[in-house]
Amino acid sequence: MALRIAFDMDGVLADMETELLRQATSLFGEHAIRRLQALQQRTSKLQTLADTVEEAPSEADEPKPDRPKSDAASDDTPPSTKFQLSLKQQRQLWRHIESIEGFWESFHEIEPGAVARLAALAADRRWELIFLTKRPRSAGATAQVQTQRWLQSKGFTLPSVYVVQGSRGRIAASLGLDFVIDDRPENCLDVVVDSRARAILVWRDDERLVPPATRRLGIGVVKTVGECLDVLTQIDSPPGERSSVMDKVMRLLGLKEPASV
């Protein structure tokens, strides 16, 4: 059976953060953004330390995690940024974004050639792919159409794009997905809580900053989309064709077989 896979857009394939940072700097000034980034780095280090020293339950005793309480309240909010802004600044930034025609077509690819490789693998392996995003509107075409145009420009013809809200897990369950690839731990948590799909977290930051519960909950962690595609290709291969090294990698990721097997 062909794998059914969903890829998140921003932070996985498209470099939204660089363009958002550029737009925020033009609005608020470089000094203000640098000050906010320094504050965020200190806050992140303190939170990581707190997460590390907190006693974690064993796998045998750990209950199935609840969906974050903020999920329902966040359905109508735009994508969050990895650099801190005040609520007032966030509203200013997204109002500014709404006025930019073709904003969602302006990004660079995080890993040049990754979309074209994904398209080639999907065609060769007969994977069924969809692309998920929470992009709000901007001037010009809809966010869905702009995203489709961007993917086509990077080598993926006829992409299926869904602009979605709410739990990624419920989406995965309703569509019968096998894998969801995302760059946000909270979205991966939704997947493992609300569906039978496997979640793969693309984490390009320091591995020491990965939330401690991620692997314990069966969420695979990779550093690049390229590494993710290597894993998916091996999973989709007959067991006899898998290398012993890749078998070990998949076991470490908790991804030995597709969820539908």
Image (tube, helix red, strand yellow):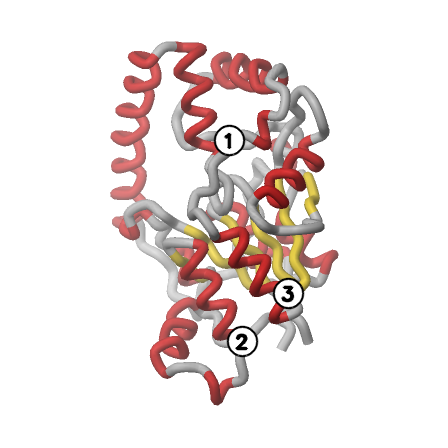
The alpha-carbon separation of the residues under discs 2 and 3 comes to 21 Å
Q: Quadrant of the N terminus?
A: bottom right
Tell me what residue is drawn at x 57 percent, y 72 percent: 258
The amino acid type, in three-letter code, at marker 1 is: Ser
- Does label 3 or label 1 sit earlier along the sequence? 1
Q: Position of residue 72 (x, y in %)?
A: 65, 36
In the image, is residue 241 above or below residue 204?
below
- The span from disc 1 to disc 2 (Cα, nearest Å) is 32 Å
Q: Earlier in the sequence, mark 2 or mark 3?
A: 3
- Circle number at residue 80: 1
Looking at the image, is mark 2 or mark 3 nearer the viewer? 3
Q: Residues within 10 Å of mark 1 (few under 14, many from 20)?
A: few
Task: Give the percent coordinates (x, y) of residue 140.
Answer: 70, 22
Q: Of residues 35 and 115, which is closer to you in this image?
A: 115
Q: Residues within 10 Å of mark 2 (few under 14, many from 20)?
A: some
Q: Nearer the viewer, residue 188 or 150?
A: 150
**Can see residue 137?**
yes
Secondary structure of the residue carrying numbered label 1: loop
Residue at 40% across, 24% down:
84
Q: Give the x, y percent position of residue 181.
A: 53, 54
Badge count: 3
Q: Which residue is mark 3?
A: 123
| Residue 196 makes an appearance in the image | no
* Amino acid carrying mark 2 in the image: Glu
Residue marked by disc 2:
257
Picture layout, residue 80 above or below residue 201: above
Q: Choose mark 3 or mark 1, whichever is in front.
A: 3
Figure check: 70 above or below 6:
above
